[in-house]
Image: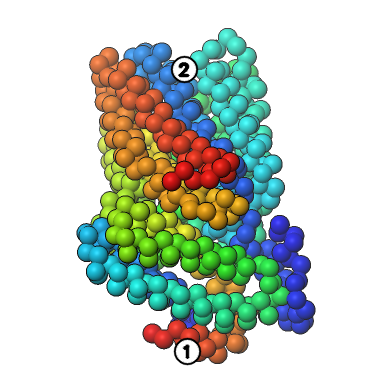
Amino acid sequence: MAGRQQKPQTAAGARGAAVRMGTATLSLEQAPPISVPLRFFLTAPLFAIAAALALLSLGPAVWASRWSAGALAVTHLMTLGFLAMVMIGALMQMLPVVAGTPVAQARRVGGMVHALLGLGTLALAGSFLAARVPLLAPALALLALAFVVFIGAAAGSLVRARAAAITVRGIRFSIGALGVTVCLGLLLGVGRSWHQPLPVSRLTALHLAWGLLGWVGLLVVGVGFQVVPMFQTTPPYPRILTGQLTRAIFVTLLLWSSAQCLSGHLALAHESAPALACLLGLGYAVFAVTTLALQQQRRREMPDITVRFWRIGMASLLACTALGWVGLCRSQGVPISLEFTWGILAILGFGVSVISGMLYKIVPFLVWLHLQASPSGRGKLPNMKQIIPERRVYIQFWLHLAALLLLAGAAWMPRLLAYPAAAALGFSNLLLWLNLMSAWRLYTRILAGGFPG
Amino acid sequence: MVDSIYSELSTDHRHCDDLLGAAENQVHRGDWLSAGKSLQDFLGATLRHFEAEETVLFPAFEMRTGQAMGPTRIMRTEHEQMRALFEDLRRDIESRDRGHYLGSSETLLTLLQQHNLKEEQVLYPMADRALASEVPELLQRMRADRPA
């Protein structure tokens, strides 16, 4: 499609041709077929259900250590299977809109990345849970390939994008951080698979920070700058934040990582690492507080489920910062329950909440948009609130909140809450999946025979 | 950047957003009379904005860049999609169908915002660069079509 648009349609003068050279790569079409993003969105809740089933079958034992096989499996089912799954699908859809540059070969890239990421995540979780089965090496190969293909395709789109766009910068940093996360993860996996001696706890801290505070956090901040004012009808973010915050967070993350790596050798590095970690927390706290303040000034009076999901996300982000600071202040190590709570707030409270809120806007809109463009679009079409009925969305919202609170509670009282928390996580994601599937089923039904009214 | 296509038309987007938001708030409260008036204001402002783009900006851009099938074609298509939703909103106000109005308004808001995003992130900056010396005259012509 891009190629077709680059051909001049009318005779243009020499000056027009020069302009065309500069703008030829920028075009606004190329939204990928609906199947590209939706396959990612409809798969993600299934991985969260798998995480819930793992939690149910393992019971309170999972909560004994963050290094337990169960905890590692559940964490990766959520981060790779849910968060990365949706974020990659959303980027495939979003790049043409925010950057003006589509992902080349979106259909093929989307299909490949989806399959590789899904299989790789299953194999990785399996390798943790069934240590005797040799699944780790194939898992690493599948995941490495998935991310190489995705990062390559996204980078191809981003180098052509207009640098000034505020969201583009956040996406670039975020994908850079994804690259670092993947390399660190592969290193850890290779060390585990081939029993190489590695500084595992330090590398894990880096892997986790680049994944959650880099890839996930920077994407939410960068995209939030754009979508919160537009779709939640708030005033814009202050210019100093949109101009500097993603860069400041990325640079701080780099400095903190260097300090972590050198802390055994250099006194200055050892002393500056906690200060840099505090600063990282501060960056995210500023984003969370600003977002909550802007949401208070939204122009629409009607309740909006996306705003509610984002509020949970921002509150969780603030809680993460506070817990992080508490952890830094403690001289004798951090209790395991605190570490678990931090992870739950970051992954489920921040990541899953924000993403769920976005999915409830993106999926009905995409269904509407693609129906509009189809031959069936000439008849009367359902609007977004008819595509996913609001009542079921609200029930899912409350289930999600219950799962978050129960899981955070289970970190402190695993005997009492491990099973209810796992069940709530499972039901919440089952309903999320059913809600998203109902939109897809409506889409296929209308394509087949029209809107029943 | 006082007199740029970007600044002028982005400001106009925000004005239209406010009017659409006001109509939605009034329907939400059940104030149908005010909602009808706000919707009229929104439709008036937005249709003038579309017309200024379709009759002045887009043709100038297409002439200069030779891209008649490029970004402007997509923008015209989205204008058409929005015009269809305008009809839904008008009907819902007449029949006082609160639930349907709020659903249509949500759909329009989303379509409108992602449309604005593309114009503000991609098309207007491109137009400002491509049409550099013609910009003041184009803005004059668009203002004539679109009285404040």
Query: What residue lies at 64% left-to-right and 51% top-to-bottom?
Result: A103
Residue A84: x %, y % from top left: 52, 38
Residue A328: x %, y % from top left: 31, 37
Q: Is residue A135 left or right of residue A315?
A: right
Query: What residue lies at 58% left-to-right and 9% top-to-bottom?
Result: A132
CA–CA distance between discs 2 and 1?
A: 69 Å
Q: Quadrant of residue B90?
A: bottom left
Amino acid bearing label 2: Ala
Residue A43: x %, y % from top left: 52, 32
Tag shown at residue B144: 1
Amino acid bearing label 1: Ala
Closest to the observer, B85 or A414: B85
Q: Chain of mark 2?
A: A
Query: What residue lies at 60% left-to-right and 73% top-to-bottom?
Result: B126
Up-down relation of residue B110 to residue B56 (above or below): above
Label 1 packing within 10 angstroms: few (<14), some (14-19), many (20+): few
- Say what secondary structure mark 2 lies in: helix
Q: Which residue is mark 2?
A: A69
Q: Is residue A376 left or right of residue A423?
A: right
Up-down relation of residue A393 to residue A381 (above or below): above
